[in-house]
């Protein structure tokens, strides 16, 4: 049987990979994927805590957080698509201002 510590370790590893990717990569799509990894790692840790406590409220909270993250990605990808059409690049370092 998988213990809560193992779930927490996987959540911490997911979060750490997301932070490392966010700090080292410059492609905007990769940055969004790293943000999703961080959200999923934190959600997994939250669910493991709530499972250990025998509560279902945490799972409902994480479900809402996943829905909000999906909406955030949809809006982010639409903004990225518009930026790519106007600037022809997805490098975050080259986008210094919001001026077109």
Image (tube, rainbow, N blue to C red):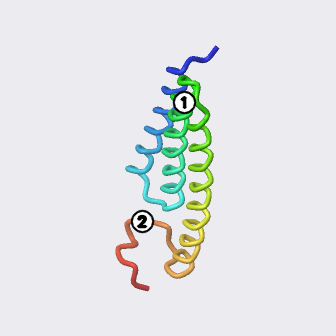
Where 39 sits versus 97, above or below? above
Location of residue 57 in the rendering, given as x and y in whole percent from the top left corner:
58, 38
**Does the residue at mark 2 contact the one at mark 1 (Cβ under 8 Å)?**
no
| Residue nearer the viewer, 46 or 25 | 46
In what quadrant of the picture does the N terminus appear?
Answer: top right
Residue at x 60% of width, y 50% of height: 64
Where 32 sits versus 45, above or below? below
Mark before the other along the chain sequence, 2 or 1: 1
Question: From this viewpoint, which residue is outermost toward the bottom?
Answer: 100
Dot 2: element: helix
Q: Provide the residue designation for mark 1.
A: 50
Dot 1: element: helix
Picture disc at residue 77: none
Q: Provide the residue designation for mark 2.
A: 92
Location of residue 33 in the rendering, given as x and y in whole percent from the top left corner:
54, 52
In what quadrant of the picture does the C terminus appear?
Answer: bottom left
Q: In 3D space, how far apart are the residues under numbered discs 2 and 1 (Cα atoms)?
A: 37 Å
């Amino acid at each position: 049987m998988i213990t809560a510590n193992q779930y927490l370790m996987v959540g911490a590893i997911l979060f750490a990979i997301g932070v490392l990717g966010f700090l080292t990569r410059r492609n905007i799509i990769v940055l969004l994927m790293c943000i999703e990894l961080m959200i999923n790692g934190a959600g997994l840790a939250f669910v493991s805590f709530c499972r250990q406590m025998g509560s279902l409220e945490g799972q409902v909270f994480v479900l809402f957080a996943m829905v909000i993250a999906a909406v955030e990605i949809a809006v982010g990808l639409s903004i990225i698509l518009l930026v790519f059409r106007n600037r022809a690049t997805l490098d975050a370092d080259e986008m210094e201002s919001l001026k077109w």
